[in-house]
Amino acid sequence: MDIVKLIDHDDMPRELVETIVQHAHKRNLKVVAHAHKPNEIRIGVEVGVDNFEHTGLTTAPGYPEDVLAALRERTATGIFDGLLFWTPTVEGLYTYEEAIKNHEYLDDSCWHRGLKDDTIADIQASLAAPGQLSYKQLVPLRQPTLKRKIEQLRETGVVMLVGTDVGIPMKLHCQTTWHEMAVWVDDMGFSPMETIRAATYWPAVMMGVEDQYGSITEGKVADIIAVRGDVLKYINLLQRVDFVMKEGVVYKENGRVNEAILPAQLRQ
C-alpha cells in the first residue's frame, strides 16, 4: 500500500478516523479524502488529511465560509507538514454538456489498449447513449458552480494537483489527463506552467518522492515525456506525446513506439 483513501469518513466514528490518519502517517503513508460533503472537509482538515479530492456532488454555489476558514487556517499555520493539497477533478463535470453534443472522442481506439475484446464491447455498449446515463443527470446543475469553487479553493492557499477521476462514465484513461489540463488553462484561469507543475512536481511532493520524481533534474529517475511544439501556448499539444522515456529507457521517439520492448498486452 502506498496511500490511504477515506470516503464518507464523516459517517465514521471520529476516533476511528483519527487513528487511521495517525497510523498512516507513522508509516510515512499519505492520506487522501473525498471532499464531496462539507463535513468530510471539516473533519479531514482537523485530523490531518494530506490531500482532498473532487469539488463536491451538490449544486450549492460554493463552499461554506467555515470550511474555507478552516482551510485557510490549516495552510496558514503549517500544521501537518505545512502543505495541504487538493485534486479538484473538474473536467469530467465541466465539459459534460459539450461532450454529449459531440462525443466523437469516445470512438478513439486509444482506450482499447490493454483491454480484452469483451471488456471493450461492454464499455462501448455502456456509452451508446451518453446523455441518458443516470450517473450524469445532476451534472448540468453542478457545472455552473465549478469556477467559483476553484476560485475559492485557490484563495485558501491549498496546493492544487491535476487528477482526472478516470473511470467515471465517458472518461477514458488515454485522454483524461490532457482534457483536465486543458480545462484548467482554457476555463479555470491557471497558467500552462502551473498546470504542468500541478501534474508533475507537486504530485511528487504530495507523495513524498520529490527526491526521485517530479522534475527533470540530475540524479532523479529519468521518466520524461516530450511533445513537438510550444505547450506553454497550446496546452492541447499534450494529447500527442512524441517521446516517452521510462527509467532511462526510450519507449517512444518521433511518434513511433518501440514495440519490441513493450509488455505484450500493450503491443497494439
Image (cartoon, rainbow, N blue to C red):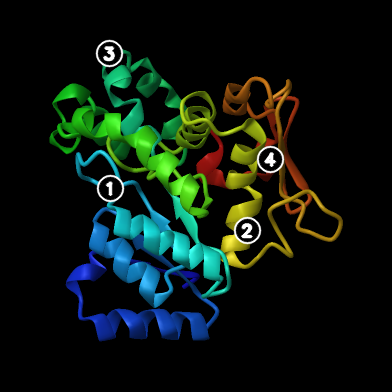
Helix, strand or loop at mark 3: helix
Cα distance between the residues tagged 4 and 2: 30 Å
Residue 18 versus residue 95 in the image, above or below: below
- Circle nearer the viewer, 4 or 2: 2
* Residue carrying label 4: 260
* Residue carrying label 2: 204
- Amino acid at pointer 4: Ala
- Amino acid at pointer 1: Gly
Residue 47 versus residue 202 in the image, above or below: below
Within-10-Å neighbours for mark 1: few <14, some 14–19, many 20+ = many
Cα distance between the residues tagged 2 and 1: 25 Å
Q: Mark 4 or mark 1, which has the lower sequence index?
A: 1
Asked whether the beta carbons under mark 3 and mark 4 sit within 8 Å of each other, the answer is no
* Residue carrying label 3: 101
Helix, strand or loop at mark 2: helix
Q: Nearer the viewer, residue 11 or 68?
A: 68
Specify whether residue 98 is in view: yes
* Residue carrying label 1: 56
